[in-house]
Image (spheres, rainbow, N blue to C red):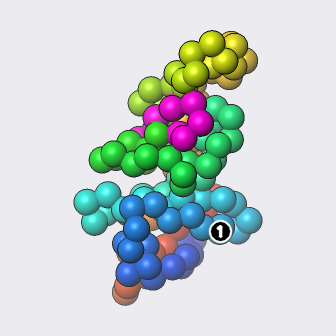
Amino acid sequence: MPFVAIMSETEAKKKPITPIFVGGRPLAIYNVDDKLYATHRLCSHTCAPLTRGKLEGHVIECPLHKAKFDVRDGSVVNWASRPAAMVKVLNFFSRPRPVKSYPLKVENGKVLIDLP
């Protein structure tokens, strides 16, 4: 699928994390050091909204169980760890999985995304 425009560059850079729906998909746009990245909006552990998480550098932390993902490629930095007793049971059924990431580019002040 070709790249499609989703928002203005100015809008995307207003906040560190911007929730958006594109083609019916819940996505998160991250602004890190003036560079933009996109991932699926929901944590791959228990579908908590990453847009409510804490962004530190290139790492987004899930607000529910503290799983951490690199927003550049969706890779797992640290799997879910809190609260310890509950997560131990959940992790038995849910092995570490990255969140889906999507290529972005900026052209003529517009943010474009490549959705397969």
Looking at the image, which residue is at 54% across and 41% down?
Answer: 63
Which picture quadrant has residue 106? Answer: bottom left
Residue at the extreme left of the image, as rendered: 33
Which SS type dominates the magenta stretch? loop
Residue under pointer 1: 22
Magenta region includes residue 65: yes
Left or right? Give the position of 2 relative to 76: right
Residue 99 coordinates in the image, percent (x, y): 56, 41
* Residue 36 vs residue 62, the one in the foreground: 62
Q: Callout 1: few (<14), some (14-19), or many (20+) C-alpha neighbours within 10 Å?
A: few
Three-letter amino acid code at disc 1?
Val
Is disc 1 placed on a helix, strand or loop?
A: strand
Q: Residue furthest bottom?
A: 108
**Does the stretch in magenta take in 92?**
no
Specify start and end residues of the magenta stretch as a single range.
Answer: 62-70
Q: Measuring 55% from the left and 76% from the top, which residue is drawn there?
A: 6
Q: Residue at x 60, y 67 (%)?
A: 20
Residue 69, image x, y percentages: 46, 38
Q: Quadrant of the C terminus?
A: bottom right
Quick check: 24 above or below 88? below
Q: Where in the figure is residue 107, as x and y percent of width and height? A: 38, 80
The answer to which of 55 and 95 lies nearer the viewer is 55
Tell me residue 105's x, y (percent): 40, 69
Whether residue 97 appears in this view of the structure is yes
Number of numbered discs present?
1
Res. 73 in view: no
Give whichever of 84, 18 is nearer the camera: 84
Using the image as rendered, state which of residue 78 and residue 100 is in the foreground: 78
